[in-house]
Structure formats: C-alpha cells, structure tokens
C-alpha cells in the first residue's frame, strides 16, 4: 500500500468519525444551496477536516471539493465529496459515503469510498486492484442483458433495456457503481448532472475491479455530467 492510499484511508477514518455521529441526529442542521441541493453541517465539517489534514500532510497538493471549490493549480490534486448522498444522509437513509480520490496530472491514482452507515468501505490504487474491506473484488462475468442486474438512477425515464434485463434496481449515487465493482450488479447508469467529485473515486474502483467506466458517449472521463459503469461485457449495450 502506497503512502497516498494509506493517507486516503486515514482521511476516510477522519470523515467517518465526523459524519457518523451526526447521522440521524435530531438537531442536524440542513440548509439549501443555490442549486437547490441540500448541504448539512456534516458535509462542511468533513470537507474542512480533510482539507486541514491535507494542508498539514500534503501541503503541495491541491484540493477540489464539493463544498469549498478547487484550489489546485495543476499536478496533484485530491478530489473530495464529503458526503455523497446528502439527501439520504439528511433523512436518515444509510446509503451515503465519503468519496476521496487522488489525481496526478489528470490520471487517477487512488480512490476510497467509505460508507460507515452501511459498514463497508471500498478502495483502489492504480495498477494494484480494488478491494472491499480488505477483500479483493472483481466485476461479474455476465455477458447477456437478459441475465443482468442493472441499476438506474430514477431521475430519468427508464430506457427500454430495463425491461430486457433480469432485474432492474433504483440504486443510485456511489452505491450502484460499487455494486458493479464487486460483481453484485452488472451495470449502472447514473443520474443526469453528476459532478467530478461524485465520480472520481468510484471510477478508479470500478476500473481496478476489471470494469469499464465512461460518460454517456463512451469516453473514459468524469467531467461531463454523465456516468455509466459496467463489467465491460455489457457496456456497449448500456451506451446504446
């Protein structure tokens, strides 16, 4: 394990120690951002804590976070979503996670997805594979849509392919992609308008688990507001 991955896991521990005690708190403060999405006190506290730790341990690295923007100027930057699934978090639904990724000159190096309310954590490092709680994971070998479990965000009209697959589910956010990475689901189409901090950590986990991750046009990128992950065998059909 590299020092970068070790630090990313420590950052996830830090995030968990802040977010989990406030989960389902009766006095949790929730506000509405200008884009009408919710933000809780835990979102801001987690990102502030991660930024402070990185400033101390990696002062030369930049940080791009959902709540406090991008202070990077090229080279290495950490990409942070303090709580992916804030709507779930604010309503007491345990499907939320802190997403932490390290990018170096545009190439993702490390990704950690920590979901403490689910009791699970996934991580990956470029060239070293993907893991769930220390166990190596790999995408499925399902090669036919008719045998596949597919996840779809429910903010869009379900495509025709949903009627063809063996089972369609409405899992969203990070979890759909992690189910693909560990072989429980075979493909996932994310919500419209997802951002780079929603996708950086999950992309490297999916790819290091042997899967494919792309935008809706099939390009391996995380900055155009769309995302599809799969075991690779079904990707072209999902793109269609």
Image (tube, rainbow, N blue to C red):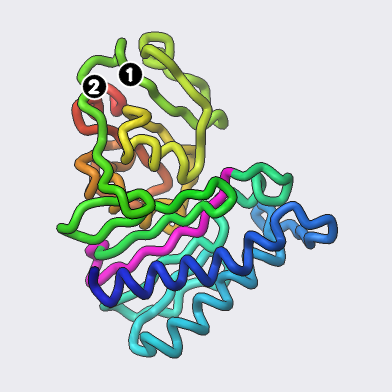
Q: Split into 4 quadrants, where in the image is the C terminus?
A: top left
Q: Where is residue 185 in the image (x, y as percent from the top left)?
A: 36, 29
Residue at horizontal 43 percent and vertical 53 percent from the top: 121
Q: Where is residue 87 in the image (x, y as percent from the top left)?
A: 66, 47
The residue that disc 1 covers is 148
Relative depth, front residue between 67 and 174: 174
Q: Position of residue 93 (x, y in %)?
A: 66, 42
Label 2 – label 1 distance at C-alpha: 6 Å
Q: In this view, does 211 lie above or below 125?
A: above
Query: 10 Å neighbourhood of mark 2: few (<14), some, or many (≥20)?
Result: some
Residue at horizontal 35 percent and vertical 82 percent from the top: 61
Q: In this view, does 15 lie above or below 71?
A: above
Residue at horizontal 29 percent and vertical 45 percent from the top: 206
> In the displayed image of the protein, which residue is found farthest to the right?
27
The residue that disc 2 covers is 142
Stretch in magenta: 95-108
Q: In this view, does 127 lie to the left or right of 14?
A: left
First-in-chain label (2 vs 1):
2
Q: In this view, does 72 lie above or below 15?
A: below
Relative depth, front residue between 44 and 69: 44
In the figure, residue 77 lies in which quadrant?
Answer: bottom left
Res 33 visible: no
User: SS class of the residue under badge 2?
Assistant: loop
Q: Is residue 43 left or right of residue 131?
A: right
Asked if disc 2 and disc 1 are in contact, CB closer than 8 Å, the reply is yes
Q: Is residue 2 above or below residue 158?
A: below
Q: Where is residue 73 in the image (x, y as percent from the top left)?
A: 34, 81
């Amino acid at each position: 394990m590299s020092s970068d991955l070790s630090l990313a896991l420590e950052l996830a521990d830090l995030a968990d120690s802040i977010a989990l005690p406030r989960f389902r708190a009766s006095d949790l403060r929730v506000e509405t951002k200008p884009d009408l999405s919710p933000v809780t006190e835990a979102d801001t506290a987690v990102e502030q804590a991660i930024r402070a730790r990185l400033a101390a341990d990696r002062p030369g690295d930049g940080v791009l976070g959902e709540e406090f923007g991008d202070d990077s100027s090229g080279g290495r930057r950490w990409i942070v979503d303090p709580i992916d699934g804030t709507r779930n978090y604010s309503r007491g639904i345990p499907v939320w996670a802190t997403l932490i990724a390290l990018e170096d000159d545009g190439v993702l190096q490390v990704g950690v997805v920590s979901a403490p309310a689910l009791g699970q954590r996934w991580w990956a490092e470029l060239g070293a594979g993907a893991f769930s709680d220390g166990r190596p994971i790999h995408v499925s070998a399902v090669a036919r849509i008719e045998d596949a479990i597919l996840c779809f965000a429910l903010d869009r009209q379900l495509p025709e392919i949903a009627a063809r697959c063996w089972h369609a589910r409405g899992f969203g956010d990070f979890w759909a992609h992690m189910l693909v990475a560990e072989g429980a689901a075979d493909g996932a189409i994310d919500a419209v308008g997802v951002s780079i901090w929603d996708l950086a950590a999950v992309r490297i986990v999916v790819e290091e688990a042997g899967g494919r991750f792309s935008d809706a046009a099939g390009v391996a990128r995380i900055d155009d507001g769309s995302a599809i992950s799969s075991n690779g065998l079904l990707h072209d059909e999902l793109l269609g």
